[in-house]
Amino acid sequence: MSENSNRAKNPVKSTVTTFRIIESLKELDGARVTELAQHLDLPKSSVHNYLSTLEQEEYVIKQNGTYFVGLRFLDLGAQARSKLPIYEIAKPEVRSLAEESGELSNLLVEEHGKGVYLHRATGEDAVRVDADTGQRVHLHNTGLGKAILAHLPQGRVNAILDKHGMPSTTENTITDRETLFKELAEIREQGFVFDREERLNGLRCVAAPILNKDNQIVGAVSVSGPTSRMSTERFSEEIPDLLRNAVNVIELNIAYRKS
């Protein structure tokens, strides 16, 4: 399916503006009316009306004149996540990966051409990074994302890259399609993928795809840690082995789960 096929033929301008405001509140980590109006290049009075309505409907909160995204979105996100079988199936294995490796483990799925973190677990030595559950990230510059792209049709991958681009976040980010497609082929062959500081400097990751019984991609799991600990045989052999075992359990549970 083309990434452009889900575009509205007659988008409602006020709805688009509402979500621009919500996304901006998230991006700015809260904002006053004037700051938000300047950020979006919208009239201050209009922004105030939108925010007042969102506050009335309990989707934003106001504290000392500053507006923030409200917890009502958490309820919506939790309900959306609960509808994905992969979440409950993979969650125990993600926790086990964190415990066994001592690092940060992740579960990612693709939606609208971006990756969404469904679940994260921290081991004893895990580092804190800039992504939380629910956050959306590009697919080309993460191990998890590349694991997913490797198992999507090439036309779909091209559509995703056309829509979202291949922005560089570190000097190691792959920004060339030919190079990316070559690596995706290698990922399909070896069954796992390395992220060598491609999204964040100082952070390495090993990821593996999760496939259903029809060999379709449903998500990916990973283990991430600082470069100082993710090196030599631990990075190239020990962590991939842990991931293979976890993915094997997850895929068996997907294949034989009761509908």
Image (cartoon, grey):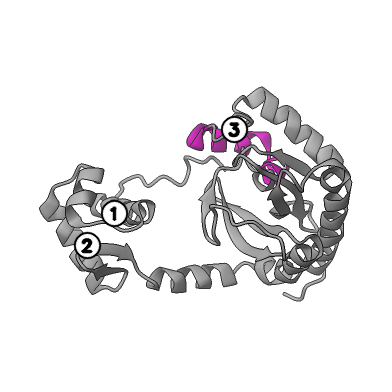
C-alpha gap between disc 1 and disc 3: 29 Å
**Label 3: which residue?**
158
Compared with residue 72, is residue 100 higher up or lower down, i.e. above or below?
above
What is the magenta range? 146-167
Disc 3 residue crowd, few under 14, some 14–19, many 20+, Cα 10 Å: some
Which image quadrant for residue 71? Answer: bottom left
Compared with residue 179, is residue 143 higher up or lower down, i.e. above or below?
below
Residue at the spot 32% in from the left edge and 69% down from the top edge: 59
Residue at the spot 74% in from the left edge and 63% down from the top edge: 98
Q: Secondary structure at mark 3?
A: helix
Image spot of residue 53 (x, y percent): 21, 67
Q: Amino acid at mark 1?
A: Ile
Compared with residue 200, is residue 87 higher up or lower down, i.e. above or below?
below
Image spot of residue 147 (x, y percent): 72, 45
Disc 2 residue crowd, few under 14, some 14–19, many 20+, Cα 10 Å: many
Residue at the spot 80% in from the left edge and 42% down from the top edge: 231
- Judged by its main secondary structure, the magenta piece is helix
**Label 1: which residue?**
21
**Label 2: which residue?**
51
Q: Classify the position of the C terminus by image quarter.
A: bottom right
Image spot of residue 216 (x, y percent): 74, 51
Disc 1 residue crowd, few under 14, some 14–19, many 20+, Cα 10 Å: many
Which image quadrant for residue 212? Answer: bottom right
Q: Which mark is residue 96?
A: none
Q: Classify the position of the N terminus by image quarter.
A: top right
Q: Amino acid at mark 3?
A: Asn
Are circles 3 and 2 on residues that touch, CB within 8 Å?
no
